[in-house]
Image: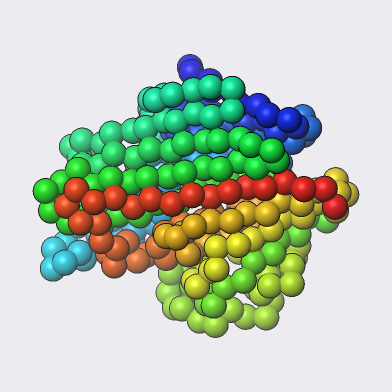
Amino acid sequence: MTLLSLRTGRLSVEIEPEAGGSVARFAVGGRDILRPGRGTQGAAYPLVPFSNRIANGRFEFEGRTIEVPRNWPDPAVRHPMHGDGWAAAWRAQSSGPTAAAIAFEHDGTSGWPFRYRASQSFRLENDALTVQMRLENREPHSVPGGMGLHPFFIREPDSELFFDADAVWLADAEVLPTRRVTVPSDWDFCHGRRPDDVALDNCFDGWDGEAAVVWPSRRLRLELAASAPFRHAVVFTPSGRPFFCFEPVSHANGQIGCTHIAAGGALSGEIVFRLSDL
């Protein structure tokens, strides 16, 4: 299994292309800030070519019905989720002491019914990790498509999450979106909120691309800045787990049918994780 190791100053990152193009470890001063591991049980993995669930594996796109098969290993998840990338072997395109690039080409014969090429590049500099993502449509016609990143932040009793958004999608028992509403006061993270104080698995709309995670006991702060098209964020704060997730994504849960990538076109953006001491 290929492991790409990056290091500069006090930051270190390990990437496993063959394990779903995932980040296996992201640490500062030898201490993990994301949950270490492999693939979907690791620190972070890509969401391509869609984020979250597709209800019953069916949606409408430009007058056509698109069908996507179930793909998640947990039989309790009845709906296809998070695309193909997490289950695929990516290939290393380049690698050095502080930067690496990986890619995955999907032929459309299984899973997502359209051809695409996904790529990720990782760069460490000073106290920041930059992840650039790109999704290229390899079809001679327009297709739906989206992308995102699914990091698992280390959760401590005093951890706090900060971000601002216009609205949030309520969800049913299967975590399928039901209704878009103004963010309730109990779910408002504008002035910070501990993940331990609220259990969520919801998508927020109208996100401005900025967020922060603070670990007061570590005297550490992480600033997250995402470019367009990442203007939605999925927040996952499961009770009793040693992690929480803040996922920058390009489309709202259940809204993949509203996306559009032209023939030969591409979707691209970057996410920056910047560390500082309190």
Question: What residue is at 45 percent from the left and 60 percent from the top?
Answer: 228
- Write the residue at 46% across / 36% down: 121
Is residue 143 rendered to the left or right of residue 70? left
Q: Nearer the viewer, residue 219 or 50?
A: 219
Residue 156 visible in the shown view:
no
Give the x, y percent position of residue 37.
60, 31
At 62% from the left edge and 80% from the top edge, which residue is drawn?
184
Residue 229 at x, y = what percent?
Answer: 42, 60
On screen, 94 above or below 141?
above
Is residue 117 shown left or right of residue 85? Answer: left
Name the foreground residue: 271 vs 169: 271
User: How many numbered circles are shown?
Assistant: 0
Front-most of 166 and 195? 166
In the rendered view, would you say 57 is above or below 130? below
At which x and y percent is residue 152?
62, 45
Left or right placement of residue 33 versus residue 234 in this view: right
- At 33% across and 33% down in the image, what residue appears? 104
118 up-or-down from 261: above or below: above
Hey, which quadrant is residue 97 in on the image? top right
Q: What percent of the width, then of the height, locates residue 245?
A: 61, 52
